Image: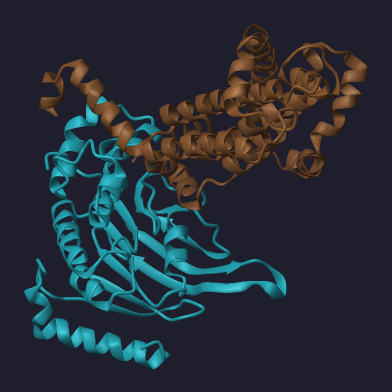
Chain colours: A brown, B cyan
Amino acid sequence: MAAVTSVSPVAAGARWLARWWSRSWLFLLFFAAFFVAWEVLVDALEVPRYILPKPSTIVIKSSADLDRLVYYTWVTGTETVLGYAVAIVLAVPLGLAIAFSRFLRQTIYPFFVSIEMTPKIAFAPLFISWLGFGLLPKVIIVFLVCFFPIVLNAILAFGSLSEELTRFCRATGAGAWRSFVKVRLPAAMPQCFVGFKYAAINATVGATIAEFIGSDEGLGFYIQIVTGNMRPDLAFAGIFFLTVLGLAVFGLVTLAERLLIPWHISVRRAAS
Amino acid sequence: MTSIPAASAAIEIRAVRKLFGSGAEAVHAFGPSDLSIAPGEFISLLGPSGCGKSTLMLMIAGLLEITDGEILVDGDVVDAPRTDVGIMFQDSTLVPWRSVRGNVELQLELRGLDVAACRERIDDLLRSVHLDGFEDRALWELSGGMQQRAALCQAIVHEPGTLLLDEPLGKLDAMTRERIRTDLQDLWMRRRPTVVFVTHSIEEAIQLSTKICVITPRPGLIDHVIDIDLPWPRGLDARRGEGFVSHLARIQEIFHGYGVL
């Protein structure tokens, strides 16, 4: 351990880079091969540009439209992050309440399970007709898409403390609050993160489809408009920015997971 | 060990019976049985899997409702979880988000005790089970045997006068069991708590106990209470002695009679 402190930051950075490279080169190679194959096959099979453009064409043509793409990423990102954050803030305490209340478990829980079976996106036209083309209906759609997986996983998380740990807490005479802070809450975090991650994957889906249905800005809107103008190159650029947005949201949740539950097996596996 | 343990407790079990469920569906898990445990005794509850020995232990701890009869600890009827005992459950109560020391401290923190004031006590305890140097390790860095030692420290750090140990060595390999058994015997001889030790190993019970309660399979009944009058300490060589072997033969005979051996 003492040796680490004597190494310069540059050398430490180089070592980190080397480790990252040894882990990632295969994946990067596969990625590069995918785009090269795409480029070559479009030419070789003489696919018309209005059907499927080459990656190089997408990059060149869309760079002229970069300002709009960046701004629309910001718009869609705002809808996604707001809806997602509100879903977490409301769903976790509600999941906790349902896990501990027999009454709520018999009333609101079956209701939530039924709604989870409904495709939430089906509500999108209604919200847009009620609330117009602005930010709010999109935030609500993202919220609906994210809320149910988070609340259902939170109920599972808080309701499934092992019998042994429950008895352990009781045998110490600890009150409900102290047992919660010291045992129940940390024990529930891994299952909560299952919900957070699932919801993070679906959050951008909700925002995009809500924009398809009715909006005048955002990446979903952009993709729809440029496709109508026979510009699949720009549509692919929009899809690329959506992917970056999705990765950024998921990456942030994964980072939070690493910081909050570094002890959990899923995090330790991912790190090794 | 500088600290003085709380006074050992006497345990009285009177016509205790346990049913799970109710009506015609009820499962008769234990009893009715009586048992007196004197302060400072090391009692083993010995029986095959599913004979209700863990059930009895949980009832003594006040963690499981008694269907009929009553249990007294130091003259008090048990009707709520007893916070003055140390319990090692069948499955681990070590939590993965805390280090070895953190897990031991959890017992104190849940009780609202001052952890900083107990620092020396925790160090002594970890040293006594050979965990010094591993205090700050994460659980997954420890072997199964080390985890069980850590669990033992967690169970007794509040210095209870009574220990309830539910197959604490059950999942360990034979050599590790042997070593932790020795640690457990040392600990008992030094502090003399009242111990109720649940096990299905006949040899383990003979080596450690002052008395063995032989429990019948389904429903569990305390069928024999056998005094183990062998000299202390009982190491590996004690197990070759004549007394040890004759106890072993007798208890094997009893289980043979139940059809479980």
Q: Nearer the viewer, residue B3 or A138?
A: A138
How many circles with numbers are drawn on the protein?
A: 0
Task: Give the x, y percent position of residue B37.
Answer: 32, 64
Image quadrant where one finds the C terminus of chain A: top left
Task: Give the x, y percent position of residue B206.
Answer: 22, 75
Q: Residue at x 24, y 57 (%)?
A: B145
In the picture shown, does residue A202 fall above or below B172? above
Where on the picture, by quarter, is residue A87? top right
Locate residue A111 relative to residue B84 in the image: left or right: right
Locate residue B67 relative to residue B134 in the image: left or right: right
Where on the picture, by quarter, is residue A270? top left
Task: Give the x, y percent position of residue A154.
Answer: 62, 37
Locate residue B129 relative to residue A260 in the image: left or right: left
Q: Nearer the viewer, residue A178 or B145?
A: B145
Q: Residue at x 50, y 72 (%)?
A: B30
Image quadrant where one finds the N terminus of chain A: top left
